[in-house]
Amino acid sequence: MKYSIHVNEVKRKENQGGEQVSPLRGFASLVFGDSFKITNIAILENSKTGNLFVSMPRYKTSGVDETGNPIYKDICNPITKEFREEQYRNILEAFEKRIDGQGKAIMGETTDMLDFSVRVNGFEKEGSSILGLARVYFEDSFVVNNVSIFQGKDEMFVAMPSYKTNQIDDGGKAIYQDICFPVAKEFREKLYTEIVCEYEQTKKKNQNQVIDNVEKQVGSKEKQQGKENTPFR
């Protein structure tokens, strides 16, 4: 899978004593097959060893660990160990070398169309416009989680994972910025169509399962009643 890496350095933050107060050294973004972009990949420095490491975009869950600290989960991440090691190594090398003076590197082979698959968990909650959540798998190597399917005024629409910025729009509402998103119109239309179709198929499958369960329960009750009404001989 072809992907390009873009890196930007962040100025070190130090206190009055010259000690570093933040481990953040930079940010990286990935573009898969000139079609889909991943942003907000953090490049951090270990305060004890000075080594750099990569942290994928995360979100805060409602759970806590054994010490009471909040649990975070990756919004997107490499699936296989091999691809993760390759990708993280390439990101750090691009950051260290500042390739071509712009912090850019291109890895992998060119493909005509980025291959992907979609899985959807559908659910309906009263008072909520969210119909389901989707996962997008790119060539069985990278997954994007928390892709939302919403019911709009006239039709369903897809919303990619995003974060809240410090900016507000003209109406006083907070502005959100996508973390993962298609960069090519053709690919965006294909991806969003596939997500909506997968949602509809999943919903239909779940409805048929509910009907089957109800019919089995009714059949079981009728069978039991038949036994109870059968006279002893």
Image: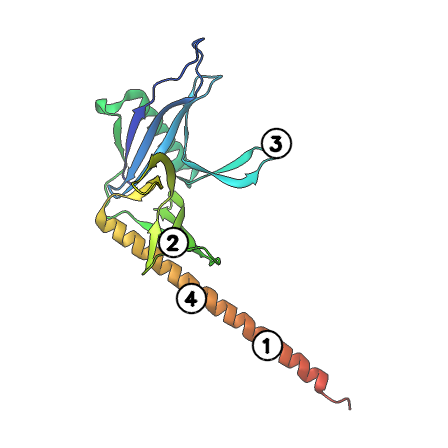
What's the amino acid at mark 1? Answer: Val
- Per the model, the C-alpha gap separating discs 1 and 3 is 48 Å
| Picture quadrant where residue 95 is located | top left
- Inspect this view and state whether residue 42 appears: yes
| SS for callout 4 | helix
Residue under label 1: 218
- First along the sequence among labels 1 and 3: 3
Q: Secondary structure at mark 3?
A: loop
Residue beneath disc 2? 149
Q: Residue at x 60, y 33 (%)?
A: 68
Residue at far front of view = 171
User: Circle 4 sits on which residue?
Assistant: 204
Q: x%, y% of residue 176?
A: 35, 40
Q: Position of residue 81 (x, y in %)?
A: 43, 37
Q: CA distance from mark 2 to mark 3?
A: 34 Å
- Packing grade of label 1 (10 A; few <14, some 14-19, many >=20) is few
